[in-house]
Image (cartoon, rainbow, N blue to C red):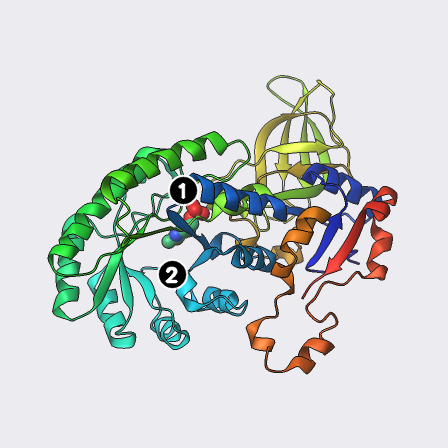
Amino acid sequence: MHLIKDNSIVVTKTQYTAEEFIQKKIVLLKDEVEPFFAVDLEDICNKHIRWLTSMPRVTPHYAVKCNDDINILKLLAYLGAGFDCASKGEIKKVMDLGVSADRIIYANPCKQSSYIRYAQEVGIETMTFDNEQELMKIKQLHPNAKLVLRIVTDDSNAVCRFSMKFGADINTACKLIEKAQEIDMTIIGVSFHCGSGQMTSKAFVDAIQNARIIMNYGIKLGFNMHLLDIGGGFPGNTGTEDYFSEISAAINKTLEEHFPDNGNIRIIAEPGRYYVASAYALATNVIASREMIDSETGNMKYMYYINDGVYGSFNCVLYDHYVPEPSLLPKNESNKKYTSSIWGPTCDGLDCIHQSIQMPKLNIGDWILWKNMGAYTISAAVRFNGLPFGKPHYFMSKQFWDSVKAAFQTIPRKYQVDTSVIRHNSCDCSNEVEDDMLPWLPEDFIEDATVVTIQ
Ligand SMILES: *Cc1c(COP(=O)(O)O)cnc(C)c1O
């Protein structure tokens, strides 16, 4: 039994933290212990504002692969962000929300031919490439494409590196520009990606300088090079705000130096984790435990099994090299800590979230909260062993809801033709308080919250 419908948003009179939201929710959940996410949509909006104020010249194109949750896409579409899509599926998902093709960059340098054709059919022109075969492919399938040349970066300081897979070096880039000129294809600019989880601003500074060199070469050959795409890699966890400020300041300064605003240059970025990492907190339940004696120290040690793991929401532990931090709900102030390990629910020994961590003793049925779980988590999760992973439960304050509700009320373009479909779709794609949803809410929540079901 799920106590709240998919895509419902809990709108509260006062503002809640994720912790408060989760705590109130688990009071009433009782035996319903499936893992779930508390999704703070307001946090995403705050990130957007921070972006616009920190780098006013750089238009963000949200990297859909990072987390393709429909409510995030709706909110960002409403807030005016662009989108970085890497496949037909991502393009379709974003365009079905009514986002126009000129707000999308197809930023996968190696694309399936049928997807290039699809992009052409739906009017997406801006796309990246980094090799001659791809250039020839696009020439054949989408001769009017506006090409963006992806160059390599030094991503040695990034958590997830891309440059071994994508990007042309300076020599290759110059040859590609010559080739494009020869076959009459249009290059409009340069892109790069400094690696996901990039830890230095220098990587951005160097890459922007290299982009300038390549752009100059293109201009020399007669191309109208007017797009600079500085990619993703911006930090998004709570606590990385200062670091984001440092990166953005360095970027602004470098742009001023190498790409002064002359009315012709357009600068975009493809942030993924920046937008979503801190908006998601995951609540998991301890479903089993095992007590042992540590043969080295003679102390007790514990193994805990929780109901989401590396095949589900914690796939970031394997793919994104993420070290998630547990906190206990309710907070356990006990300072007696034991060496513990935390395991996912599948039958696989690989399914381990923490090999060794100091924690107070936990009981079966205890809840563990994991913050900063929005980036590269549910987007790559699978139901291995028939086990579910965290389901998103959205919340926001009434005040915030009042200013953004139109984001969730817009009628998808594909439904516009046949309005009868919408009427039968239970909720007119508009907000509607569903009374039958209310009983799950904790006592003091009923006063304070309404549940809005959106389509
Ligand atoms: C993954 C990816 C991004 C997003 O990277 P983040 O580190 O999440 O910001 C942006 N652009 C491209 C081409 C990507 O592959």
Q: Nearer the viewer, residue 410 or 33?
A: 410
Residue 453 shown left or right of residue 103 in the figure? right
Residue type pointed to by label 1 = Met
- Quarter-of-image position of residue 188: bottom left
Task: Give the residue at mark 2.
Answer: 105
Is residue 420 at least partly visible in the picture?
A: yes
Looking at the rendered structure, the number of numbered marks drawn on it comes to 2
Please state which of the two labelled residues, at mark 2 or mark 1, is closer to the viewer. Answer: 1
- Which of marks 1 and 2 precedes in the sequence? 1
Q: Nearer the viewer, residue 317 or 61?
A: 61
Query: In the image, is residue 399 above or below residue 254?
Result: below
The residue lying at 22 percent from left, 52 percent from top is 168
Q: Crowding at label 1, few (<14), some or many (≥20) Cα neighbours within 10 Å?
A: some
Q: CA distance from mark 2 to mark 1?
A: 19 Å
Task: Give the residue at mark 1.
Answer: 55
Where, quadrant-wise, is the C terminus in this rendering? bottom right
